[in-house]
Image (cartoon, rainbow, N blue to C red):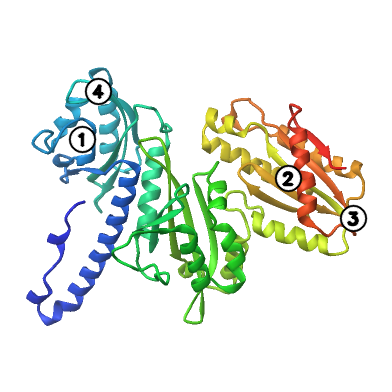
Amino acid sequence: MRDISRLRPDIEKCSEGHKSLVLEINRLLDIYQKEMEAIEAVYDIMGAKPWYIDFDDRGNIIRCEWSDNYRKKLGFEDENDFPNTIDSWIGIIVEEDKEMVLEKFWAAIKDPTGQTRFDVRYRGRKKDGSIKYFRTAGVVRLHDNKSSNSFIGLSYDDTLNHRSLSGLKEQYEIVEALSRDYLNVFMVDIHGKTATILKLDGYVTEGFGDKQKKSYPYEPFATQYIKDRVYEEDRDALTKAMSLEKVKEMLTDNSEYVMSYRAVDKGEIHYYQFTYLKLETDEGDEKVIAGFKNIDGIVESAKERALLKELSERDSMTGVLNRGFGEKTATQVLLGENKGMFCILDIDDFKSVNDTYGHNTGDKVIKKVAASLEEAFGEGSIVFRLGGDEFAVLKKDVSTKEEAEGYINKFFEITQEHTIEDLKGARFFTSVGIGLFGKEDKDFEKLYKKVDSCVYVSKKTKGNTYTFSE
């Protein structure tokens, strides 16, 4: 980590008139230090540390600083073995890849807007002569006068080709934003069921503030936080939302899981947001980073507070109801004197969409399904995302199979009419389970299980298919 102690003014040597300014500078440096520590901790988990190249106002390189992590992946011991110069890096790039890598690197450096992407895969020659594949991504930080200032990069061992072609730079930027904007940041080990503190600033959950201890069992930690901190009406929803089972489910096909909720501090209600972020490491496994932050600053009026409540009830990707609020609403409908149809659907072979076309295209397919369900079932329908590529719909006042078939067929038509360009002509299909309910049906779980079993029957037939429960 870069040493910022030299930037810290000595308050003892300042005049009385400057002491308030010095205190403010030191406060901001403390914040910066915590952010950098959190970023460094996350990069360590990911298997990399950032490296830096600094420029003068004319764009000439004046300093390089390679990470020890990068050196060791190449078989070099220290700065004497692999000096902090641009030539050290250029020298290890395999000759056939050098022109391509340097062309993209200098294009990023010379772009006065700082927007040109540098994200490349290349071969590097280790000290012993063997070859490793690396993926390197970076961003340019600019002066106020828009001339280049620093290039900050990350390099990963990609020999096993675990990393997607476009994800590295996005992960870098998300990690930086998470570490900067969130007061509390943790690494969550889903398999080991632990939470490790990466950054702690502000509220500390009771019983979990031992500075000598960084890792805690996840479930007791989450339970205590919800009990001590979360507004009573939101506790049940957050208990389910923060469970390791739910986190794992939500990150199966998405890289990010976000939810808003209300917290209580000294009798006052505040608005908070958590973000769980899935990170790929250079060993090919996955780690989860969790950040928690206060968002009162963006909730300034009654209208905005109402909007936030709506957001806390909705799936952040698609805008339809999330699973918790959707199931709650559907249960209330069944408890009333209502009749109608309930259906569950998922996208056939969705994993292959992600694997073939990338997660961005997969996200577009999920959004398309959500929008098509809302359009097909119309006003008054309850559309909610169960997680991943699964959705559910409840529609009141449907009495016959013919009526139900009309809604499902309309949905099929809509999804096939409008193609997604990124699929390059390929189509996606859905398997649907349908159940009709009457005024005597009050048990949502029982209805859900019956309809869910029908989805698996539909999957036995290729193409858009639906099956009614008995």
The span from disc 3 to disc 2 (Cα, nearest Å) is 22 Å
Residue drawn at 39 percent across, 70 percent down: 204
| Disc 3 residue crowd, few under 14, some 14–19, many 20+, Cα 10 Å | some
The span from disc 1 to disc 3 (Cα, nearest Å) is 67 Å
Question: Left of 356 or right of it: where is 208?
Answer: left
The span from disc 4 to disc 1 (Cα, nearest Å) is 21 Å
| Disc 1 residue crowd, few under 14, some 14–19, many 20+, Cα 10 Å | some
Residue 396 quadrant:
bottom right
Q: Which residue is mark 2?
A: 373
**Label number found at residue 438:** 3
Depth check: give the residue in front, 421 or 367: 367
Residue 347 coordinates in the image, percent (x, y): 67, 36
Question: Left of 168 or right of it: where is 100?
Answer: left
Residue drawn at 24 percent across, 33 percent down: 73
User: In the picture, which quadrant includes the C terminus?
Assistant: top right
Precedes in sequence: disc 3 or disc 2: 2
Disc 4 marks which amino acid? Lys
Precedes in sequence: disc 4 or disc 1: 1
Q: Indicate which label's residue lies in the foreground, 3 or 2.
A: 3
Depth check: give the residue in front, 32 or 465: 465
Disc 3 marks which amino acid? Gly
Residue 411 coordinates in the image, percent (x, y): 77, 40
Q: Which residue is mark 4?
A: 98
The span from disc 1 to disc 2 (Cα, nearest Å) is 52 Å
Q: Is residue 373 above or below residue 275?
A: above
Q: Which residue is mark 1?
A: 72
Q: Residue furthest top?
A: 96
Precedes in sequence: disc 1 or disc 2: 1
